[in-house]
Image (cartoon, rainbow, N blue to C red):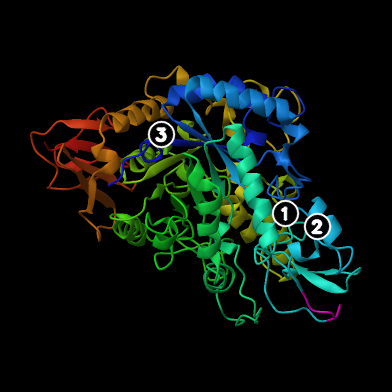
Amino acid sequence: MNTTWWKEGIVYQIYPRSYKDTTGNGLGDLDGIIEKLDYIQSLGVTMLWICPVYQSPNDDNGYDISDYRKISSDFGGDPAFDRLLAAMKKRGLKLIMDLVVNHSSDEHYWFQEAKKSKDNPYHDYYIWQGNDPQQLPNNWQSVFNGSVWQWNAATEEYYLHLYTQKQPDLNWENPQVRQEVYGIVDYWLNKGVDGFRMDVISLISKRSSFSDVPATMPFIDVMEKVYANGPRVHEFLKEMHEEVLSKHDIVTVGEGPGVNLEHGPRYVSDKEKELNMVFHFDHLTIDFGPEGKYDPVPMDFIRFKAIFRQWDQALAKDGWNSIFLGNHDFSRIVSRFGNDKEHRRTSAKLLATVLMTLRGTPYVYQGDEIGMTNVAHKSIELYDDVETRNAWKAAEAAGKDMEEFLKAVHWQSRDNARTPMQWSAADNAGFTSGKPWIPVNDNYRAINVEAAENDPNSILHYYRALIAFRKAHPTLIYGNFEDLLPSHPQLYAYKRWDQGATFLVVHNFGDQPVDWEDLPEGRQCRFGNYSQQAANSLAPWESRIYQLD
C-alpha cells in the first residue's frame, strides 16, 4: 500500500455561500472562511474542499461558471482568494477546489460566441444536434427535469445540457476544449492549489449515437449506461493526468454519477493514472425509489453495509476509497442515516465513528460536526435549489399528491445541506448580520457551534477527539478491513488490522439496544460514544472501538 498525505488526511467540505458572511449581504464569503480557519484547524482536518467560487450567474449556485480564472465578487474576488490561500498555507491546510468542466455557463464567452453561427471558431466547443424546432433530437431527460435539448435560433439547432439549460455541455471530443481545460487546471495549480474535486467528471465523454433511451429504463440506469462512462472518458482523464496533473503533488477526486463497482476501480487504479479517488453514489441512492430521489423508499441496511464492503474489496490492492455519507447535494447525515430526534447526539457520533474507521479518506461536510439536521420548510417558496423547484413543477404537472411530495422534499432536497452554518444562538445563527440568502434552520438556538464548544459531551468535541484518535493509529487508515456481521439487521461490526495493531469497531444502527455475545470481555474500549457500557449489549446508536492487540 502506497502511503501519502491525502490518504492520511481528512477533508472538510465548505459550501461558501452558507458558511460565514462578513459583509452583511446575507451571502457567505471567503473572508468568512478565513475568519473561521482557527476553528476549522481545531477539528484536526487537513484539507478543505471549497465548492465553486468562480464568476457565475448562479443558476445552479456556482456550478455554472462564466469565467474559470476569476473569483466571483460575491465571495470577495481574487484578492480574498489570495488571502485565503495564504492563510491556509500558514496553517498547513491544503486547498481542494471544485473543477466544473463537463459544462460551462451559457454566459461564458465560449458559449456566447458558439451560439452565434456554425462558422464561429467556438461553435464546436459545445454539442449540437437536430435542425427542426418541432422535433427534439432524442428523448433524453435532464438531471433537473425536462429535455436535455435547448433550441438555438441563430444556428437552427439544439445544444445539449445534461443539467439546467444555462449549463451547456462542453464538447470534449474537440482537442481545443481539452487544452482550454488543462490550461485552467494549470492556472490554479500554479497559484498553489493542492487539488481538485472534479464535478460530474464521469459524464465528459458522450456516446455519439444519441439514441433514445427506453421509456421504462430507471433514471439511475440511464445515468450509468447512457450519460456516464462514455467511450473516451478514460482516455481524456489519462491525457489530463499526463499533461498537467502529474506535474504537481496534488490530490484529485472525481464526482462519479453513474460510476459503480463495474467502472469505479478503473478511474482510481494506480496503474491507470487517472484520478486518486471517486465519489460513487451507491450508498447515497440507496433510498431512491423507482421514480428517483423524490420517490423515497426505506433504507436497506444490509445493502448499505454490503456497498462499503464491496468497494473496500474492489480497491484494497489498487486504488483508494473516499469515505463520505453526505455533502452539499444530499440530506444531512444525521437525518438520513441516524435519528435526528431523540438520538440525534449519539447517532451523529456513531456516524462520525463510521467515517473515521473505514479504510479510505474521510470527508466531513460543514455542520455535521455539530449534528446539523434537515430543514422542513412549510412551503416550496422557501426552497432555493433549482433541482428541488424543478422537481416540484414536474410533480404538479403530473398530478401528484403535493402534500406527500413536500414530505419527500423535506427528506431529500439539496437545501437540507445548504442552510446557513449555525455558529451561535444569535440572530440568523451568527451566520450574517443581514438577511440570509436562504432561511436558517429553526433549531439553530439549540444546535450551534458556541453551545457545542461549551458542552464537554458535544458532537463537536467527539469529532475532535475521534479525528485525533484516527491520526494516532495508522491501522485505521491503511489496515485491512473485514465485515464481521454482513447480514445482521442492526449491527455493523468490522475488524481493522495490520502488523501494528488490531481494532474491532462495532455500531448499533438502531433505536433499540442489541445483545452481542462476541463483544470482547476484559478488553478496554478505546473509544465510544457512551460513557457507561454494558458487557454484552450495545445501547441505541452506540459505537465502540476496541483494540484487540
Q: Which mark is residue 345?
A: 3
Task: Please indicate, yes or no, whether residue 107 appears anywhere in the rendered image.
Answer: no
Instruction: Look at mark 2 in the image and give the residue it sits on.
Output: 111
On screen, residue 34 above or below 363: above
Q: Position of residue 271 (x, y in %)?
A: 37, 57
Along the line of sight, the residue nearer the viewer: 473 or 156: 156
On screen, residue 332 above or below 420: below
Q: CA distance from mark 1 to mark 2?
A: 8 Å
Q: Position of residue 73 (x, y in %)?
A: 77, 32
Q: Is residue 442 magenta?
A: no
Question: Is residue 438 shown left or right of residue 244?
Answer: right
Say which label, 1 or 2, has the lower sequence index.
1
Q: Which residues are magenta?
A: 129-134
Instruction: Residue at 59%, 61% (x, y): give it.
Output: 294
Q: Quadrant of the C terminus?
A: top left
Q: CA distance from mark 3 to mark 2?
A: 48 Å
Task: State yes or no: discs 1 and 2 in contact (Cβ < 8 Å).
Answer: yes
Indicate the secondary structure of the residue bearing disc 3.
Answer: helix
Name the kind of residue labelled 3 in the image: Arg
Instruction: Look at mark 1 in the image and give the residue it sits on.
Output: 104
The answer to which quarter of the image holds residue 313 is bottom left
